[in-house]
Amino acid sequence: MSVRIRLKRFGTKKRPYYRIVVMDSRKPRDGRTIEEVGFYHPIELEEKQVKIKEDRIRDWLNKGAQPSDTVRRLLNKLNFRIK
């Protein structure tokens, strides 16, 4: 099973809200997740936009999970180092 760390969309039209989740790469975007590891709210103030569980993300990365391009960009924005 190929595991990815990616975004799952919530919210209404033109008011998106995303959860950062760990899920099988073959599942649809809003399908069943393995674990939720944070959120991303692009409409909020800059310091409240992203909140992550660093220990859980590190654990999943060590297990071989691959972040999507968008999640990788968000983690780099938070100075979270990905090997």
Image (spheres, rainbow, N blue to C red):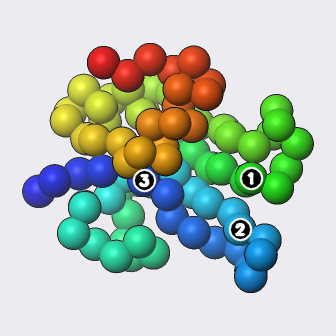
Mark 2 residue element: strand
Please tell me how crowded label 2 is: few (under 14), some (14-19), or many (20+) other residues with Cα within 10 Å.
Answer: few
The quadrant in which the C terminus is found is top left
20 relative to 76, above or below: below
Q: Earlier in the sequence, mark 3 or mark 2?
A: 3
Residue 73, position as x, y percentages in the image: 51, 36
Name the image quarter holding residue 26.
bottom left
The crowd level at tag 1 (other Cα within 10 Å; few <14, some 14-19, many 20+) is some
On residue 6, the disc is 3
Nearer to us in this view, 13 or 30: 13
Tags 2 and 1 touching, CB below 8 Å: yes
**C-alpha span from label 1 to label 3:** 15 Å
Secondary structure found at label 3 = strand
Residue at point 25%, 61% (across, down): 24
Residue type, mark 3 in image: Arg
In this figure, which residue is indicated by the disc labeled 2? Answer: 16
